Image (cartoon, grey):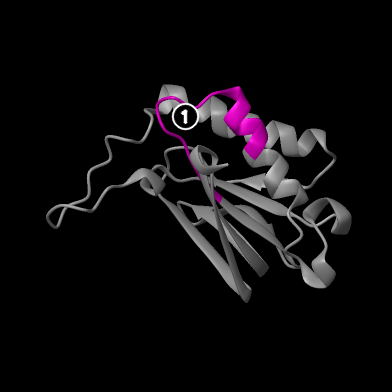
Amino acid sequence: MRAVLQRAARASVAVGGETVASFDRQGIVALVGVTHDDGPAEAATIARKIADLRILDGEASVTDASAPVIVVSQFTLYGDARKGRRPTWIAAAPGPVAEPLVDAVVADLRGRGLEVGTGVFGADMDVSLVNDGPMTIVLDTANA
């Protein structure tokens, strides 16, 4: 499982022109991708990292600061563009495998009492954010 975490001063996700998630104070936008052999353990690892990494102001974590999180499913994190001009997506898990694992990340974060918004799985989304810092962290459970 992969995640790209971006610390943001504000962020929103819209689908079809309707805002489905937003925050207007420092928080994290987490783009989450799933590959074929991921399971509940990888989802738990990603959720723990999102909650506990000390990447907010004052070296606080999302948990420490009660900061908001927006989780957006992002199969393109498993795109492979090493050959040619067109990426391949064969390393990305199909929706029926990926969606429950992204949902597990969200459920884990909410279970920690965090404020979590989401995109809409499989939808064409407009993700907007003001990158704060900038601070961007790439997580990959294959390298954990």
Q: Does the segment drawn in magenta span residue 121? A: no
Task: Pick out the residue farthest to the bottom.
Answer: 133
Task: Indicate the position of residue 106 as horizontal and vertical percent values.
Answer: 66, 37
For residue 102, which quarter of the picture? Answer: top right
128 to the left or right of 23: left
Other-residue count near label 1 (Cα within 10 Å), few / some / many at <14 / 14–19 / ≥20: many
Residue 131 versus residue 11 in the image, above or below: below
Q: Nearer the viewer, residue 4 or 120?
A: 4
x 60%, y 73%: residue: 130
Residue placed at 55% from the left, 28% from the top? 101
Q: Position of residue 76 (x, y in %)?
A: 37, 47
Q: Which residues are magenta?
A: 31-45
Q: Is residue 97 above or below residue 4?
A: above
Q: Nearer the viewer, residue 54 or 31?
A: 54
Q: Which residue is mark 1?
A: 98
Give the structural element (helix, strand or loop) at label 1: helix
In the rendered image, residue 67, in percent from the top left (x then y), is placed at 80, 57
Toward the viewer: 121 or 56?
56
Question: What's the residue type where badge 1 is placed?
Answer: Ala
94 or 41: which is nearer to us? 41
Q: Where is residue 68 drawn, in percent x and y?
A: 75, 55
Count up the numbered dots: 1
Residue 41 counted in the magenta span = yes
Which residue is the extreme one toward the left?
84
130 left or right of 127? right
- In the displayed structure, 49 sits above or below 57; it is above
Q: State the residue at coordinates (65%, 68%).
A: 8
For this view, does 35 lie left or right of residue 22?
Answer: left
Above-or-below relation of 94 to 88: above
Instruction: Check the picture and name the quadrant holding the C terminus.
Output: top right
